[in-house]
Image (spheres, rainbow, N blue to C red):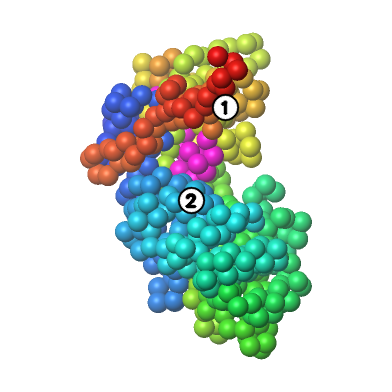
Amino acid sequence: MHHFIFKDNELYCESVAIADIAEAVSTPFYLYSSATLTHHFNTFDKSFGELPHLTCFAVKSCSNLAVLRLFSTLGGGADIVSGGELYRSLKAGVDPRRIIYSGVGKTEEELRYGLVSGILMFNVESEQELDRLQQVAEEQEMVAPVAFRINPDVDPKTHAYISTGLAKNKFGIPMEQAENIYLRARDMKNIKILGVSCHIGSQLTEISPFTETLHKVKLFVKRLESLGISIKYLDLGGGLGVRYQDEKPPHPQEYARALKEEMQDLKCTLILEPGRVIVGNAGILVSQVLYTKQTGTKNFIIVDAAMNDLARPSLYDAHHDIMPVNRKADGAADKPFQKADVVGPICESGDFLARDRELPPFEQGDLMAIMSSGAYGFTMSSNYNSRPRAAEVLVKDDKFYVIRQRENYETLIRDESIPDFLE
């Protein structure tokens, strides 16, 4: 469900014509619907009803301050994986007591930052990280709240690059090693054990991997309790998928029912880290057609967005629906669909947004909407080929707000310098 709809053949975001935004801010730009963001967050969070839980939005999926502030006002927390994401979350007004710090490579500085900020919990991912956190906490004369991210070795049945819960993945601690690490942590003066954490992957479209994981984790929690280690929080991570093409992911209510049934005999607070399921279909990337080109064997639609703006197609061969912003642009509506590649200006053969796609007729100057780009869109963008990153825009009702200004050539070199010997 989203609020990108056609009215008289013009694509709107809520009550704002997207063409009007393009005229005001130029292209390419990311566009988010506040109504969709709100609806998705509330639908997910309220699906768990009276079950004690905390919904911590996965900041890596969409980290704009305005988006984080919106979720914070709805009672959400933040799942972070870097000091930068912690900084963003705090600046956006997220309560630090609702922030979970994950990630396999936290630096000493980042551990200290999280500790002095008063976050709810570190999800520790290795024994050496535990030792470093103990050292930092001792130096600060503080006690660090921790969970350990365990690796349940469950196949999430998703793309290999976004699988995180198999034994071969870099994330977490193997379950057979985790018990001894918990026992070590129990005896550390500056460590307080609060929870158990896991995360098996992203864009999951089946419930069974979640329930299999939760069952394994539940048995592990009971084992810890038999050893006198009390667990207050069970962090099941995120990963619930969305529709990009023909996927049929479960509704959050179905997901919640399955988890609640498995949680019945546990007295933990459940922590959830949704990202894509909240923002994926709440955002689009708007681009303009620069040129069209036929080579005899291929048709190309060359647009002003590129792989540096949206990396998912090049990185994962991911599908994003593509729609015209004006379904009757330049009187082309009567022309038949044609198979074409949608490509950008980047000097890489891997620079594409769609390949061999049956598309409506696009002509030079037309606006194009690349759908379902709200998750891992702007956050994965770069300045490759010295391209300024796109603007971000948020719509609420009949108004739009630029929530990130478009970069320019000056911002590209702002932090660079030429040493004296080259002057």
Residue at x 47% of width, y 22% of height = 304
Kindly identify the residue that appears in the image at 57 percent across and 80 percent down: 231
Residue 202 in the image: above or below residue 226: above
Where is residue 200? Give x, y as percent.
64, 60
Bounds of the magenta segment: 367-381
Residue sitting at 64 percent across and 80 percent down?
Answer: 186
Residue 68 percent across, percent down from the top left = 39, 52
Q: Give the percent coordinates (x, y) of residue 226.
A: 66, 88
Q: Residues within 10 Å of mark 1 (few under 14, many from 20)?
A: some
Instruction: Identify whether 230 is placed above or below 139.
Output: below
Q: Amino acid at mark 2?
A: Glu
Quarter the C terminus occupies: top right
- Inspect this view and state whether residue 98 appears: no
When asked about the image quadrant of residue 187, the answer is bottom right
Q: Is residue 131 magenta?
A: no
Q: CA distance from mark 1 to mark 2?
A: 22 Å
244 to the left or right of 390: right
Residue closest to the eye, 259 or 192: 192
Q: For this view, does 187 lie left or right of residue 146?
A: right
In the picture, the disc for residue 62 is none
Q: Amino acid at mark 1?
A: Tyr
Q: Which mark is residue 85?
A: 2
**Helix or strand or loop: what does disc 1 sit on?**
helix
Judge whether 422 appears above or below 96 on screen: above
Residue located beneath label 1 in the image: 384
